[in-house]
Image (spheres, grey):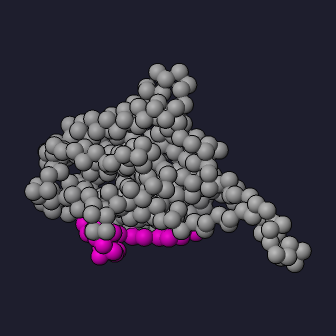
């Protein structure tokens, strides 16, 4: 899992400029590649920064003076070998630092995928299918107004393909069966990406595929690469409309979108969360709300990551603050790139080349 997210960070860094170039939905702000890169980077680095498990002392009697030396024996941390626990940690880090629609939806995907994997020390075709299915359902439900032809469709296609392969394996938990499921998931994701162009009028008019969908395809191919120990499929994106290097930055020719993107984290009761979603739906669009962490606090409130596009941040922030105390608030113009560290992001891209 660490290798997967590390590969995804590098791949998205290398492809961020081209993803930005074809980013015209839901707004033509040209930052899908940057947002996905920074969100995946947060997930990957949360695992890189994890403290190493202390070495176990197999035979304390070998120490010079056991009576005077503290017993440093310590069992390995089970979470280090729990696929779900590792992904849950990465997902929470991604959620806390999610950027834009695409980054928020990926963080929802990652958090949800961790749940069926909890307690498992290895990936199988069955657990992969369960994780992808849970993730795509949660991503669809996080949006107030989900739209086919986006990365949601790519997630769904991958999950359905993995489930179909697993169903034909009759419980086979071999690595071979897992490889078949991963191959099928990536192939289905590619077909779904190609299909996005015809699913959204804006993409069809510009003759491009969906940027978020391409980013999700890259992430899934990185998973296949990391699990199977093979190289990324260099020809995977060949022929995707708008994705050749010589193609123009489509978003630059689109009219600027009015309004701002508001994001924050806030603790809310389930009732208040439902109320906030309803009020934000009335104020703007691209409303995404997803729970951060599985457990409530002492007052029964859950932490939520909130995302919305509105014409004016004032009413949205006032509505949010009326129900709780928002943290990590960001307000960004939709008409401008929202990468606060473009040089750092570009450096990460160059390192991966």
For the question of whether residue 122 can be seen, the reply is yes
Q: Is residue 32 left or right of residue 313?
A: left
Quarter assignment of residue 30 = bottom left
Q: Is residue 254 left or right of residue 267?
A: left
Q: Residue at x 38, y 55 (%)?
A: 8
Count of labels shown?
0
Where residue 175 appears, as percent x and y from the top left, is: 49, 35
For the question of whether residue 74 can be seen, the reply is: no
Is 105 on the left or on the right of 302, as rendered? left
Please give the name of the residue rendered at 11% of the width and 55% of the height, measured from the top-left corner: 247
Residue 68 spot, x, y in % from top left: 87, 78
Instruction: Say which quarter of the image contains residue 325.
Output: bottom right
> As drawn, is 325 to the left or to the right of 225?
right
Check the image and name the residue furthest to the right.
67
- Image quadrant assignment for residue 9: bottom left
x 62%, y 49%: residue = 82
Which residue is found at the position 9% from the left and 57% from the top? Answer: 246
Q: Is residue 90 above or below residue 63?
A: above
Q: Which one is nearer the viewer's eye here, 339 or 81?
A: 81
Viewport quadrant of the C terminus: bottom left
Q: Is residue 353 magenta?
A: no
Give the x, y percent position of residue 163.
46, 29
Residue 96 in the image, given as x and y percentages of width and height: 51, 63
Asked whether 39 or 105 is in front, the reply is 39
Which region of the structure is painted magenta?
322-349
- Front position in the image: 180 or 341: 180
Q: Residue furthest bottom?
A: 68
**Which of 249 and 144 lies nearest the eye of the viewer?**
249
């Amino acid at each position: 899992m660490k290798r997967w997210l590390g590969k995804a960070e590098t791949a998205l860094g290398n492809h961020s400029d081209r993803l930005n170039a074809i980013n015209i939905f839901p707004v033509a702000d040209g930052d899908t590649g940057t947002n996905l890169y920074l969100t995946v980077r947060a997930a990957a680095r949360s695992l890189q920064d994890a403290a190493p498990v202390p070495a176990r002392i197999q035979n304390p009697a070998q120490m010079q003076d056991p009576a005077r030396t503290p017993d440093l024996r310590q069992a390995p941390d089970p979470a280090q070998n729990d696929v779900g626990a590792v992904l849950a940690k990465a997902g929470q880090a991604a959620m806390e630092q999610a950027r834009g629609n695409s980054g928020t939806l990926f963080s929802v995907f990652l958090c949800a995928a961790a749940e069926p994997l909890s307690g498992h020390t290895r990936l199988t075709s069955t657990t992969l299918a369960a994780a992808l299915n849970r993730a795509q359902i949660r991503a669809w439900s996080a949006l107030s107004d989900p739209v086919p032809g986006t990365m949601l469709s790519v997630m769904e296609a991958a999950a359905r393909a993995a489930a179909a392969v697993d169903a034909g394996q009759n419980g086979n938990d071999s690595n071979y069966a897992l490889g078949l499921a991963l191959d099928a998931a990536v192939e289905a994701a590619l077909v779904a990406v190609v299909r996005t162009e015809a699913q959204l009028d804006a993409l069809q008019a510009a003759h491009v595929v969906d940027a978020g969908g391409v980013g999700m395809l890259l992430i899934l191919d990185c998973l296949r690469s990391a699990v199977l120990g093979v190289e990324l499929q260099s020809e995977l994106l060949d022929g995707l409309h708008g994705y050749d290097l010589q193609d123009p930055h489509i978003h630059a020719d689109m009219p600027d979108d009015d309004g701002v993107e508001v994001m924050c984290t806030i603790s809310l009761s389930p009732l208040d969360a439902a109320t906030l979603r309803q009020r934000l739906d009335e104020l703007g669009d691209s409303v995404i709300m997803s729970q951060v962490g599985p457990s409530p606090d002492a007052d029964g409130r859950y932490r939520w990551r909130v995302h919305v596009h509105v014409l004016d941040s004032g009413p949205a922030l006032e509505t949010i603050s009326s129900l709780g105390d928002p943290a990590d608030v960001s307000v960004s113009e939709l008409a401008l790139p929202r990468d606060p560290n473009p040089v750092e992001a570009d450096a990460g891209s160059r390192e991966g080349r």
